[in-house]
Image: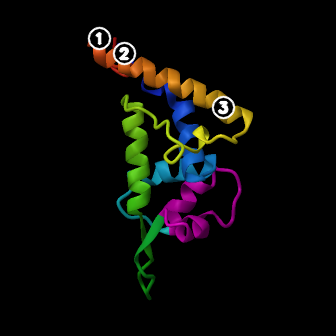
């Protein structure tokens, strides 16, 4: 059986990075932590070691509201953290897009659709239009969505 959930991953990933102001390593970290209900700095550091070096990543994600403190560090207890509501919503949105939900094409929901963007955003914008059209056609014709095994 053939699945193609990741066919448009590059486009969805770029949309998420532009929409939420994340870099690739930060997005990868949030995706790694998504399955962890609670985590300590040690779990964070475990995955951080394979990402591009950024000594301030943890503090920046905490300050920007992507992760939140669940339990303060105390004597004999390590501090625990969790992804924030904002991070969970964003990652849930990624999975919905991979599942065939349209990528927004409005300026307020997708910065790639603003008037003054760089060339690469214009290229992605055109591709997004094509993806959304393909998804709509598959819904109308009743064909299987692009992610279902053939």
Q: Is residue 25 visible?
A: yes
**Marks 2 and 1, how far apart at CA:** 6 Å
Residue 20: x percent and y percent? 55, 52
Residue 58: x percent and y percent? 58, 66
Please report whichever mark, 2 or 3, sits nearer to the chain's N-terminal start.
3
**Marks 2 and 3, how far apart at CA:** 23 Å
Residue that appears at 45% across and 76% down: 79
Q: Quadrant of the C terminus?
A: top left
**Horizontal relation, residue 123 to residue 147: left or right:** right
Residue 81: x percent and y percent? 43, 69
- Whether pointer 2 and pointer 1 mark residues with C-beta atoms closer than 8 Å, the reply is yes
Which residue is disc 1 drawn over? 141
Q: Which is nearer the eye, 104 or 28?
A: 104
Residue 86: x percent and y percent? 42, 59
Q: Which mark is residue 19?
A: none
For label 2, the crowd category at 10 Å Cα-Cα, with few meaning under 14, some 14 to 19 and many 20 or more, is few
Q: Is residue 148 magenta?
A: no
Q: Which mark is residue 122?
A: 3
């Amino acid at each position: 059986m053939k699945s193609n959930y990741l066919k448009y991953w590059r486009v969805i990933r770029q949309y998420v990075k532009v929409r939420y102001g994340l870099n690739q390593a930060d997005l990868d970290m949030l995706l790694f932590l998504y399955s962890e209900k609670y985590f300590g700095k040690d779990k964070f550091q475990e995955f951080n070691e394979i990402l591009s070096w950024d000594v301030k990543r943890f503090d920046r994600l905490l300050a920007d509201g992507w992760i939140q403190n669940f339990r303060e560090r105390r004597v004999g207890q390590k501090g625990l953290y969790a992804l924030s509501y904002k991070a969970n919503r964003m990652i849930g949105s990624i999975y919905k897009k991979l599942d065939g939900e349209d990528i927004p094409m409005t300026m307020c929901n997708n910065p790639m659709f603003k008037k003054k963007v760089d060339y690469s955003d214009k290229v992605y914008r055109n591709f997004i239009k094509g993806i959304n059209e393909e998804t709509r056609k598959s819904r109308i014709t009743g064909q299987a969505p692009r992610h279902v095994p053939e």
